[in-house]
Image (cartoon, rainbow, N blue to C red):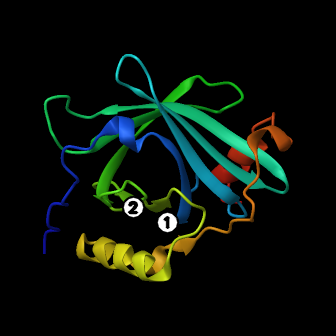
Amino acid sequence: MAKKSMEVVKNIDLARYMGRWYEIASFPSRFQPKNGINTRATYTLRDDGTVNVLNETWSDGKRGFIEGTAYKADSNSDEAKLKVKFYVPPFLPIIPVVGDYWVLYLDDDYQYALIGQPSRNYLWILCRQNHLDEEIYNQLVEKAKEEGYDVTKLKKTTHTNPPPETEDAPADTKGVWWLKSIFGK
């Protein structure tokens, strides 16, 4: 049976979407360390309409991060279908990696979101706070299930309170987290 096409948010206000989002849960990815905590993304709108993406996670007490760019997949569409481009490895950014970033659900106040992509291999539940009410979390999981995702693969992300500040964390300057992630560690 063919999978139905996914419903995507329409007419997203990108300026309102900007700022910090905490990963509440996600499908494990080889692009993130397995023991990563306090994972978050910070989005900043650029003058040219593209978005600067800063993804951060803490692993073994060190901050790992990668920066990229997001842009509308089709500038003529009202759908919240974005492309995200990162250059890897982060310590010598020479290889472009492009992925889909589709906003499948966004609450009216822009406080929590469900992010996926057409292959259904990646899924994220994001929130402006580093915690999310369990009832809302379950509603987002149900929405993902309705969109054809195998939600049994979702893994909740550990967060500390208060969340770490970027300036206070020793950086993983060698990109070790990225190398480990290639080997599934």
Q: Image point 64% across, 33% down: which residue? A: 89
Q: Specify which label sits upstream in the sequence, 2 or 1.
A: 1
Q: Position of residue 30 (x, y in %)?
A: 58, 55
The CA span between labels 2 and 1 is 8 Å
Element on which disc 1 rests: loop
Q: Is residue 27 left or right of residue 76?
A: right
Tell which of 75 and 49 is nearer to you.
Answer: 49
Amino acid type, label 1: Phe
Image vertical order of residue 4 relative to residue 171, above or below: below
The residue singled out by tag 2 in the image is 121
Image vertical order of residue 152 relative to residue 43, above or below: below
Amino acid type, label 2: Asn
Q: Quadrant of residue 156?
A: bottom right
User: Contact (CB < 8 A) between labels 2 and 1?
Assistant: yes
Q: Position of residue 96 (x, y in %)?
A: 49, 28
* Residue that extends furthest to the top in the rendered view of this protein: 48
Q: Is residue 56 left or right of residue 154?
A: right
Please tell me whether mark 2 or mark 1 is closer to you in this view.
Answer: 1
